[in-house]
C-alpha cells in the first residue's frame, strides 16, 4: 500500500492530487454534458465528430508553443493562468445554456476556446510532476497516480453528470465544472519551494528552441514508436468515446430500460438518455482507475514495456467486443476492461516517455506527445462520426479497433525493444 501511494510523501504533490482531482471530476462532467447537448441539438454523429475536429484549429499553433513555454517559464504560473481561463470558459458555457439562447455554433466556439487553453496547459501539467516530486525515484509512482486521479474522475464525473443532466439539464454540469477549478487554483497557490525552471529565450530564438526539441525526438526511435502507438490508437480506437452518445441512445438504450426505469422512478428525468451514457463512461473510468493504480504500484525494475504491449493489444480487442455487444449489462463489463487496457497503454507510454527524456527537454517532448494524441484523437472523432452516419456506430468503432489491433501486433513484432523498456 505504501509503495502504491509513496508520492504522497511530497507536500506539493499531495496538494496537486487533491486540487486537480476535484477539478478533473468537474471537467469530465462538462465533457459528458457537452456531448449530450450537441447530440440533443443536432441528433447527428457527424456533429459530435465535428466538435472534436474543431479543436484542431487552435491545437496546431498552440501545442508546440505551449511545450516551449513550459521549458522556459515556471510551470506553476503557466498552469495557474490556464486554470483561471478554463474556469471562465465553463461559466460562459453555463450562462448560454441557462439563458436558453444556446445554439450549436456557440458550443463549437466554446470547444475551440477550450482546446486552445488545453494546448498550452497540458504539456506544462505533464512536465510539472517532476517539479512536485523531490525524489526522482518516486516519479513513476507519481505519474501512475496522476493517471489514477484522471481516470477516477473519469469514473465519477460522467456518472454524476448522467444523473445531474437527466434531472436538471446540461447547464448545471457546466457551472459545477467552473466551481471545481477553484480547488486546483488554491492548491497551486499553496505550493512552496518549487524549482525555478525559468529559462527565458529571445523571441527570435523561439523557433529554434522548438526545433531543438524536434531534433532530439527524431533521434530517439523508441520514443517515436511510443508516440506512434498512442497516435494510431487515438485516431482509430479512441473515437469510441465520441460515439458513446449514439451507443447510449440508439444501440443500447432499449436494453438499458430496466435500469433507466428504476432510476427515473425515484426522480424526475428531463433527459433519460443521459443515464446509460453516464453509466457506460463511469464504468470505463472505474476500469481505468484500477489500471492506473496497478501502474502506480509497479516496482522500479518492472517490465513496463510488456504491460504496455498488453495494453496496446487488449484495448482495441475490447472495443471490438463492445462494438458487437447489444446487451447493456455486458457492455458495462466490457467498458470496465476497456478502461483497464486503455490506461496500461497510455499511462505507461506517458511514463516511459518521461523517464527517457532529459529534464531540459521534457516540456517540448511532452508537447509533441500531446500534439500527436490530441490531433489524432480529434481527426479520429471526425472520421468516426462520418463513418457512423454512413454505416453505423458499431461498425465505425469495430473497423477502427481492428486496424489499431493490427498496428499493435506489427509494433510488437517489428520493435521488440519496446517490450524490453522498464
Image (cartoon, rainbow, N blue to C red):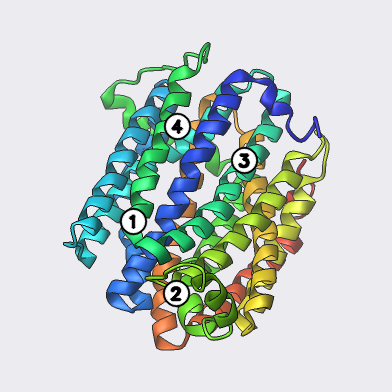
Q: Are marks 3 and 2 in contact (CB under 8 Å)?
A: no
Neighbourhood count class around disc 3 (C-alpha, 10 Å): few under 14, some 14–19, many 20 upward: many
Image vertical order of residue 82 relative to residue 229, above or below: above
Is 119 left or right of 143, judged from the image as shown? Answer: left
Q: Are marks 2 and 1 in contact (CB under 8 Å)?
A: no
- Which callout, 3 or 4, points to the residue nearer the camera? 4
Secondary structure at numbered mark 2: loop
- Which callout, 3 or 2, points to the residue nearer the camera? 2
Secondary structure at numbered mark 4: helix
Give the Cα separation between the discs numbered 4 and 2: 30 Å
Secondary structure at numbered mark 1: loop
Give the Cα separation between the discs numbered 2 and 1: 26 Å
Residue 258 point in image, percent of width and height: 59, 80
Q: Which residue does the image show at 79% across and 47% down from the upper left?
A: 420
Q: Residue furthest top?
A: 193
Residue at image mark 1: 55
Residue at image mark 4: 183
Residue at image mark 2: 273
Residue at image mark 3: 353
Indicate which disc, 2 or 1, sits on the residue closer to the N terminus.
1
The quadrant of the image that shows the C terminus is: top right
Image vertical order of residue 201 relative to residue 309, above or below: above
Residue 71 point in image, percent of width and height: 44, 26
Number of disc labels: 4
Give the Cα separation between the discs numbered 1 and 3: 24 Å
Amino acid at each position: 500500500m505504501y509503495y502504491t501511494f509513496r508520492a504522497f510523501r511530497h507536500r506539493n504533490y499531495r496538494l496537486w492530487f487533491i486540487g486537480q482531482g476535484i477539478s478533473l471530476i468537474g471537467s469530465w462532467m462538462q465533457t459528458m454534458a457537452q456531448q449530450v447537448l450537441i447530440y440533443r441539438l443536432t441528433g447527428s454523429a457527424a456533429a459530435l465528430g465535428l466538435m472534436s475536429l474543431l479543436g484542431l484549429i487552435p491545437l496546431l499553433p498552440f501545442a508546440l508553443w505551449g511545450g516551449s513555454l513550459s521549458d522556459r517559464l515556471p510551470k506553476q504560473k503557466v498552469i495557474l493562468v490556464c486554470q483561471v481561463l478554463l474556469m471562465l470558459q465553463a461559466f460562459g458555457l453555463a450562462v448560454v445554456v441557462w439563458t436558453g439562447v444556446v445554439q450549436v455554433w456557440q458550443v463549437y466556439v466554446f470547444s475551440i476556446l477550450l482546446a486552445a487553453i488545453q494546448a498550452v496547459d497540458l504539456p506544462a501539467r505533464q512536465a510539472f510532476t517532476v517539479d512536485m516530486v523531490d525524489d526522482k525515484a518516486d516519479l513513476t509512482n507519481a505519474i501512475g497516480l496522476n493517471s489514477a486521479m484522471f481516470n477516477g474522475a473519469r469514473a465519477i464525473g460522467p456518472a454524476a453528470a448522467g444523473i445531474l443532466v437527466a434531472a436538471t439539464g446540461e447547464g448545471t454540469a457546466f457551472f459545477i465544472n467552473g466551481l471545481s477549478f477553484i480547488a486546483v487554483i488554491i492548491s497551486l497557490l499553496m505550493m512552496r519551494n518549487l524549482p525555478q525552471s525559468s529559462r527565458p529565450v529571445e523571441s527570435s530564438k523561439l523557433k529554434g528552441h522548438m526545433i531543438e526539441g524536434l531534433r532530439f525526438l527524431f533521434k530517439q526511435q523508441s520514443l517515436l514508436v511510443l508516440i506512434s502507438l498512442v497516435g494510431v490508437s487515438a485516431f482509430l480506437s479512441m473515437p469510441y468515446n465520441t460515439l458513446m452518445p449514439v451507443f447510449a441512445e440508439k444501440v443500447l438504450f432499449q436494453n438499458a430500460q430496466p435500469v433507466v426505469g428504476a432510476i427515473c422512478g425515484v426522480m424526475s428525468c428531463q433527459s433519460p438518455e443521459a443515464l446509460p451514457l453516464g453509466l457506460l463512461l463511469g464504468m470505463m473510468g472505474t476500469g481505468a482507475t484500477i489500471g492506473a493504480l496497478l501502474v502506480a504500484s509497479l516496482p522500479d525494475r518492472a517490465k513496463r514495456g510488456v504491460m504496455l504491449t498488453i495494453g496496446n493489444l487488449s484495448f482495441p480487442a475490447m472495443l471490438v467486443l463492445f462494438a458487437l455487444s447489444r446487451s447493456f449489462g455486458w457492455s458495462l463489463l466490457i467498458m470496465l476492461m476497456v478502461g483497464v487496457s486503455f490506461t496500461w497503454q497510455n499511462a505507461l507510454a506517458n511514463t516511459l516517455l518521461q523517464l527517457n527524456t532529459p529534464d531540459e527537454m521534457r516540456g517540448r517532448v511532452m508537447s509533441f506527445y500531446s500534439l500527436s494524441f490530441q490531433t489524432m484523437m480529434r481527426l479520429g472523432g471526425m472520421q468516426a462520426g462520418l463513418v457512423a452516419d454512413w454505416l453505423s456506430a458499431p461498425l465505425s468503432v469495430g473497423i477502427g479497433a481492428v486496424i489499431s489491433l493490427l498496428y499493435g501486433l506489427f509494433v510488437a513484432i517489428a520493435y521488440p525493444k519496446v517490450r524490453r523498456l522498464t
